[in-house]
Image (cartoon, coloured by chain):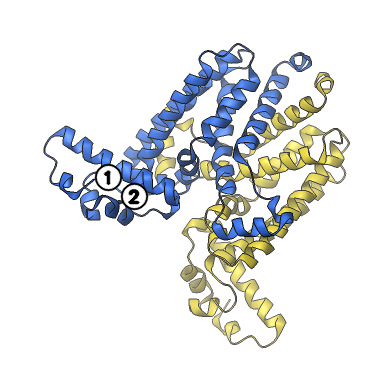
Chain colours: A blue, B yellow
Amino acid sequence: MTAEIFQRARRPEQKLQRQDAILGAARDLALRDGVRNVSLADIAAQIGIHKSALLRYFETREQIFLELTAEAWRDWAHYLHAGLDAAATGSAALVADVFARSFSDRPLLCDLIAHTPLNLERNVSPEAVRRYKQVSLGVVNEAAVLVHRVLPELTLAECTEFVATVASLAGSLWQIANPAPAVAALYASDPALAQACVDLMPRLRRTAEVLLAGLITSRNPRSAQR
Amino acid sequence: MTAEIFQRARRPEQKLQRQDAILGAARDLALRDGVRNVSLADIAAQIGIHKSALLRYFETREQIFLELTAEAWRDWAHYLHAGLDAAATGSAALVADVFARSFSDRPLLCDLIAHTPLNLERNVSPEAVRRYKQVSLGVVNEAAVLVHRVLPELTLAECTEFVATVASLAGSLWQIANPAPAVAALYASDPALAQACVDLMPRLRRTAEVLLAGLITSRNPRSAQR
């Protein structure tokens, strides 16, 4: 990627191409260094332009990451479809497994989830927040419909509750599972403290299983005996 | 609080008194403005001293907030004892209610939970992280023992799982329940987007109930019929 593509974009497709290059650079850096460590200057340097040029395409650093979050949610929904569209009715264990993998295979999405309310939604225009929310709510509702098809004994509202809870947990557990280097060294040196660390995939799958068992039991106590 | 108490602390009790004044100022500001908005300079200004004087007592801004997090966990454990020490065996609904209130009544603790792995543990010495982890792990284990006494059909490990999951959720849901002013305005103006907002206490209580029902069902399927 070179600076020359950042000469003035005259046609809409050129503008889109430039936006994609910025998003790609931000994505690569965030995956390598963590969202918290990537500045607007880092993104600009990665593509070889000045950061003022970058602000022709995005409002702020946070808007770039909010766009990446929306993109990551859409990709996540595709994965859920692939994993659950053909699932047999009643496969709660499969739902838990697919949800756990959908997050543990997507480190950038997990990292972004914690940053969204804390940082990203705080430094963009209301219109950018509105567009983001429409995507994230749409995707959560789409995921809830998928769960509802596999587990029709739950209401759609309960499926939405499940999806939102697992997504929140994925965001907070990922931060704990990926500690700062000094904290990781401390865990390695002191087995008593290592209890505080988390293995994301098994922990999310287990919690998803427990949540589904609890929702099914609350709805229909007899089903717990199956 | 005035600058005069910040003349050189000669005796250990004077040093403790000064540390308390700094922690008190940080606590007040964080409750008013949110943890993310409070800088070292803000804390220093609140007590009327220069921030270099503050660094005689704490390593960094983050160490001040990590101390407040440890203090908030200890206070939280006292609340759980008050709510659960006299609880009758089997009161899962009471456990869920006490846990939900223990977080929703403690906005500073909830705000700090999200900041701990994301920011606080990243800008302090390994020794400060170690001291903090000893407090937080000790308190989580203490809470798990309390839950285990009320719900002895669960293993102690399952009770720890419950406590850690509700605490993680409290941290992430609090950030969603307390959005930036511009996001709150958006929710108020657009009922379709308001679905993304969360009412912390009922949401936490409901999820705690579902988790306990799921854990109890997984352990002992017949108990779900009670």
Pointer 2 chain: A
Q: Give the alpha-carbon distance from disc 2 to disc 1, as whole Å.
A: 8 Å
Report the residue at 83% width, 25% height from top.
B220
Q: Position of residue A70 (x, y in %)?
A: 39, 34
State yes or no: discs 2 and 1 in contact (Cβ < 8 Å): yes
Please name the residue that numbered disc 2 is placed on. Answer: A61
| Nearest the eye: A116 or B205 | A116
Report the residue at 63% width, 31% height from top.
A205
Identify the element where label 2 is drawn: helix
- In the displayed structure, does residue A37 sit left or right of residue A221? left
Look at the picture and state if B148 lies above or below A138.
below
Please name the residue that numbered disc 1 is placed on. Answer: A58
Locate the N terminus of chain A by quadrant: top left
Q: Position of residue B86 (x, y in %)?
A: 88, 44
The reply to whether residue A156 is visible in this rendering is yes
The reply to whether residue B191 is visible in this rendering is no
